[in-house]
Amino acid sequence: MKRLTIKAAYTLSELAKALSVDRRTLRHILAYQGVETFGDSKLVLISIAEIERKLPSLFEGIKLAHMLQDQLE
């Protein structure tokens, strides 16, 4: 997982880039998992709370990547 700082919300593009997945693919995955997004077609945002509730493995991955990167710096 590429560098993601811990913050309240992520753009669809940030998450897609960090996961090395196409934006459209990630949007379909989020919809399938029932993840609520907000914004419009150009700027889609996903809250960290929604990620924690609906995608716990992604949330744990973000926390772990952040912790490991902090240790390397």
Image: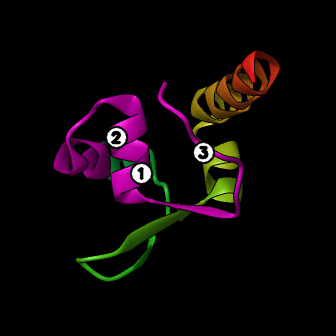
Three-letter amino acid code at the position of disc 3: Lys
Q: Which residue is mark 2?
A: 17
Contact (CB < 8 A) between labels 2 and 3? Answer: no
| Residue name at image x 47 percent, y 68 percent | 45
Mark 2, other Cα within 10 Å: few <14 / some 14–19 / many ≥20: some
Dot 1: element: helix
Q: Choose between 17 and 34: the one closer to the eye.
A: 17
Three-letter amino acid code at the position of disc 2: Lys
Q: Which residues are magenta?
A: 1-28
| Residue name at image x 21 percent, y 42 percent | 25
Residue 54, label in figure? 3
Inspect the magenta stretch and tell me whether residue 56 lies in it: no
Q: Which residue is mark 1?
A: 14
Contact (CB < 8 A) between labels 1 and 2? Answer: yes
Image spot of residue 7 (x, y percent): 70, 58
* Cα gap from disc 1 to disc 2, whole angstroms: 5 Å
The answer to whether 59 is drawn above or below residue 65 in the figure is below
Contact (CB < 8 A) between labels 3 and 1? Answer: no
